[in-house]
Amino acid sequence: MTTRTKEIIALVAVALFVVIFYIRKVAGRGAIEFPTWLSMLVILLILASLLWILVLTIRGRLIERRVVFLYVGIAVALPLFMSLTQKISVSPEVKQLYDAIVELPEGSKVLLSFDYDPPSAPELQPMAESIIRLCLQRDLKLIIMGLWPQGPQQANLALEKVFDDEDIAAKNLQYGVDYVNLGFQSGNEFVIQRMGGSFQSMFQSDYEGTRYEDIPLVRNVRNFSNVDFSVNFSAGFPGTVEWVQIAVDRFGLDLGAGNTAVQAPQMYVYLNAGQLNGLLGGMSGAAEFEDVADYRAKGTKFMLSQSFAHAVAIAFILIGNVAFFMSGRKSRLKGD
Amino acid sequence: MEHFALWLGAFLTLGILSFLYKDNAWYKLSEAVFVGISAGFWFATLFWDNLVGKFWDGKGEEPMLWVGAALGLLMLFRLLPKVGWLSRWPLAFIVGATSGLWLMNYLASNIMSQVQATILPVFSSGFGAGFDADLATIVGNLVIFVGTFTGLVYFFFSKEHKGVFGGAARVGIFFIMITFGASFGYTVMSRMSLLIGRIDFLLGDWLGMIG
């Protein structure tokens, strides 16, 4: 069988799989969930196959890189069907952010800056949802903005999700009174700089076009001194670094941050220096916050996939090292 | 429309993932669509937000906007070779203003505050004298002190890394490697999160297999 024939067969198989499951979805069938025994069986099978790959490697038969991709894909996808739960331990920086929010008195104004776009949503959206939910639960007032164009849209998606919660919906929260979305403002760090003098100079109207002075929630909000706490959800520039350097160090804003895992390590220096009041780093940070806020959602659900993927990555690093040392030993035996 | 959007999203996602098998036309198409839409989105957003929103709709009421508009216009002179030198003025303004702002910001936030955070009392929980810190705090403070000091020694190239100095530099490189390792671990987590997000879209939003 030629490679082209194999490729066509694989494509047809994928297309059939998609059609069958799409029809199943349209027919209104629910999600698939593996029982515990099946989950354990799947884990055992994956472990056994990894051991088999290790044996093959020791015997000198190296595997293709596509096999590694396939294993990572399986390690990410299968846990999404499993009913297993993972124990999550809350780190001090996550607890610090949680404490900072719950210690705010009722009616305090919290500024949320959404500085990310859809590609970073898997990490930052669960954080945003759980923080918005906690704030609204505790009757805090939310002022939302974004230094990235799609940020305010992500905020609206998070708000929609939170309002699906019956407890939050029962509060009958009003736009403009309990929360407001000021929208996107271009200008990167210079926006933060000017907000230090006047919010209105940067946001003449909100996301829906209502003039700043006509919004009851922000009518008396002139600058950072009228905000009690702030959280920045950041995926890069402009983001937490700029908020710390300008809003925190120049204007004294009390800031917590939720960051993508890539940039989280750079933020720990600000946390240790007291420039940040709490930090959520990547998906694990989101899951920890959900745990401490007693709201288990996508962050917690995705952590099982995350852990499986890490375990597979570690397994392949070990297998790769075995292959490396074995090849070195063979070279020495041959006298190369 | 919702179904069309889901299928289009899935088609493009699978197109990008198909690169893992090998480079192909489906991947190239998806990549080109992504890059084109991103550039178009940014252009449209900035055009409507800045040019139309602030300047045109605001009728240039704020005098500083005219200065910005003039500098922006000068930038386009780069397209005319004879007067291209005029485009250096807005560039000089941008470089000057940005350096002025960042110099102070970096000095205060990334140098002074960090130096202050590194100068720690080893045995005291606060900044006063005393021996009231618990063991974890003492170890943590010592790690920060030793890590910072030896890390700086490693980057001091005016003296050969030999003897005690070389030993300290060697300890420094260990700290630096651990830092790189932590960053790498976080990067792996971030990339896996993106993959989880896409698989959640494919199996959840698109095919309804997961809740």
Image: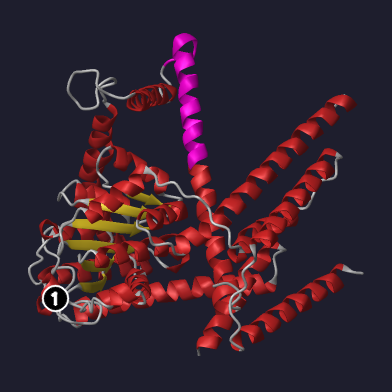
**Rendered-image quadrant of the N terminus of chain A:** bottom right
Could you tell me which quadrant the C terminus of chain A lies in? Answer: top right
**What is the x, y in percent for residue A33?**
61, 69
The region drawn magenta spans B159-182
Q: Please tell me whether mark 1 sits on a helix, a strand or a loop.
A: helix
Q: Main secondary structure of the magenta part?
A: helix
- Quarter occupied by residue A27: bottom right
Relative height, residue A254 to residue B55 (above, below)? above
Let me know if residue A329 is in the magenta part: no
Q: Residue at x 38, y 74 (%)?
A: A161
Q: Is residue A204 something one can see in this rendering?
A: yes
Front residue of this view, candidates A82 and A306: A82
Amino acid type, label 1: Tyr
User: Quarter-wise, where is residue A42 in the image?
Assistant: bottom right
Q: Is residue A176 left or right of residue B163?
A: left
Q: Position of residue A205 (x, y in %)?
A: 18, 77
> Above or below — where is B99 with respect to B136?
below
Residue count near mark 1 (Cα–Cα under 10 Å), binned few <14, some 14–19, many ≥20: many
